[in-house]
Amino acid sequence: MTDKEKQKEILKLKKELNAVIIAHNYQIPEIQDIADFLGDSLELSKKVAKLDNDRIFFCGVKFMAETAKILSPNKHIYIPDINAGCKMADMVTAKSLREFKKKYPEAKTVCYVNTTAETKTECDICCTSANAADIVNSLDTDTVLFVPDGNLASYVQTKTSKRVIPYPGFCYVHNLIAKDDVEMARALHPEAIVIVHPEAKLEASLAADYILSTGGMVKIAKETDKKEIVVGTEEGMIYRLQKENPGKKFYPLKDKLICQGMKAITLDNLLTSLKELKYEIELPEDIIKNAYEPIKRMVDLK
Ligand code: 13P
Ligand code: SF4
């Protein structure tokens, strides 16, 4: 089967099932092209909660599909590869977070959505890269534990007078982005603006023109008058930006910014997922109940 034939078959099955295909901005172009909705973590979770369809095929990493399930427990949420994981999310467990919290009994805990459902049950509120500073500032304590992304925590520290205690996690893709890379990109593309995801090293983020979630990148790419944009995030992002802004030029900040978890989703496993209704996200009832509150608090705030 060619890619076009696979896409046609996917769309046919999707229609028969009255299903919806949701895809994160880092998905491969062939998936982005057939998705009903594309977005960042926060946008996709909110979208799923608003949909009437009760079958959702989630093309992204597992914590994103789990977040959708927690917000919409009565819907059937499928992920085409059950092993499509976020390595950063696996750096903290509910147990290790309990130990971390013991050291700071006066603090409240913010969990980045890039955490497992079980870890979320241990936190006060969730955040995404789009709202992290606002979430931290909304809390009524002076000390905030920020889990698990140390780079995002350091960035949030520049936006708050509270004390932010970072957990030592990181994204192995964005952690490759250093200040030197931003400087080199500026030298190569002097007319361009530089946009960077806040999971990058803090000095790299601060050397950029804008520090944005992937949803924020979509917005700035449309709004800016600049014709050239250097993009400091996972390589999949460039496809959407270029497609939606054909009159502008987008350059990756550096090569090989590839998330294996995101790339685990393919046309082949999406097709199988629709044919065989797998892999359905299933979570224990108590985890859904206890992870719902911190996610809902975030969604209600922003
Ligand atoms: P966004 O919420 O900005 O899309 O980021 C998700 C992510 O995993 C970035 O690596
Ligand atoms: Fe996780 Fe990094 Fe992949 Fe985002 S890019 S899903 S943070 S491993």
Image: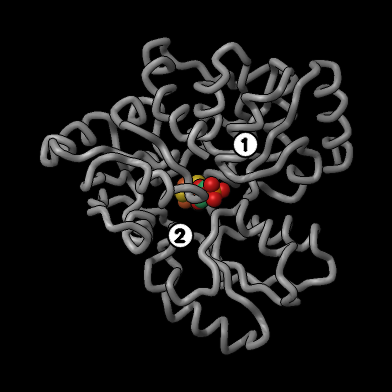
Residue to which mark 1 is pinned: 44
Q: Are marks 2 and 1 in contact (CB under 8 Å)?
A: no
Residue to which mark 2 is pinned: 198
- Specify the quadrant of the image occupied by residue 140: top left
N-terminal of the pair, mark 2 or mark 1, is 1
Q: Nearer the viewer, residue 235 or 3?
A: 235
- Specify the quadrant of the image occupied by residue 294: top left
Q: Is residue 260 visible?
A: no
Q: Nearer the viewer, residue 255 or 52?
A: 52
Instruction: Classify residue 181 as left or right of residue 255.
Output: left
Q: Is residue 68 above or below residue 170?
A: above
Q: Is residue 187 above or below residue 291?
A: below
Q: Is residue 116 above or below residue 78?
A: below
Work out which quarter of the rendered image holds the N terminus and state it. top right
Q: Element type at marker 1?
A: helix
Q: Nearer the viewer, residue 110 or 120?
A: 110
Q: Residue at the spot x=40%, y=44% of the render?
A: 135
Q: Is residue 273 above or below residue 27?
A: above
Q: Is residue 174 visible?
A: yes
Q: Residue at the spot x=41%, y=23% of the render?
A: 293
Q: Is mark 1 within 8 Å of ligand 1?
A: no
